[in-house]
Amino acid sequence: MRVDQNQTEQSQKKFFDKYVQSGQWKIDEQNISIFTELIRGEQEKGFRWLGDCSKVLDYGYGVGNLISEFNNISPSESRIFYGVDISSASIEVCKSRFVGAFSCISNN
């Protein structure tokens, strides 16, 4: 059975748009998962390695939680993040969270 790529893409887009609009993406100290704790150490190593970069591309950035973590670990006033994501709701949230420091690259 062949899966239609466009149908799969639309299904993923709908899923992520609904997830973002639900507000469940917001992370605070009370809802940090075990998974989040496990990957933090590895993220910090990678973020420090990228620390001097003035431009960062994040593919599939969602609502920008990794962008936020990166800025916390390696702050920079002049860093610009570029991102590609399938979810239009994610794009809007990310643009509002990182005004002037984020630019969406079209998926088309």
Image (cartoon, rainbow, N blue to C red):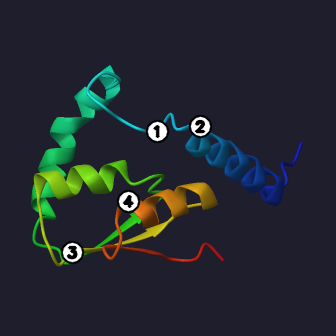
Judge the density around disc 3: few (<14), some (14-19), many (≥20) Cα neighbours within 10 Å.
some
Image quadrant containing the N terminus: top right
Q: Point out which mark residue 79 bears.
A: 3
Identify the element where label 1 is drawn.
Answer: loop
Type of the residue with mark 2 = Ser
Say which residue appears at 51% left-offset and 77% top-offset.
105
Identify the element where label 2 is drawn.
Answer: helix
Identify the element where label 3 is drawn.
Answer: loop
In 3D space, how far apart are the residues under numbered discs 4 and 3 (Cα atoms)? 15 Å
In 3D space, how far apart are the residues under numbered discs 1 and 4 (Cα atoms)? 13 Å
Say which residue appears at 72% left-offset and 48% top-offset.
14
User: Along the horizontal axis of the image, is 39 left or right of 65?
Assistant: left
User: Along the horizontal axis of the image, is 63 left or right of 79?
Assistant: right
Please report whichever mark, 1 or 3, sits nearer to the chain's N-terminal start. 1
Type of the residue with mark 1 = Trp
Type of the residue with mark 3 = Arg
Image quadrant containing the C terminus: bottom right
Judge the density around disc 4: few (<14), some (14-19), many (≥20) Cα neighbours within 10 Å.
some
Say which residue appears at 35% left-offset and 23% top-offset.
31
In 3D space, how far apart are the residues under numbered discs 1 and 3 (Cα atoms)? 24 Å
> Pointer 4: what residue?
97
Type of the residue with mark 4 = Arg
| Dots 2, 1 in contact, CB < 8 A | yes
> Pointer 1: what residue?
25
Judge the density around disc 1: few (<14), some (14-19), many (≥20) Cα neighbours within 10 Å.
some
* Number of marks present in the image shown: 4
Q: Point out which mark residue 22 bears.
A: 2
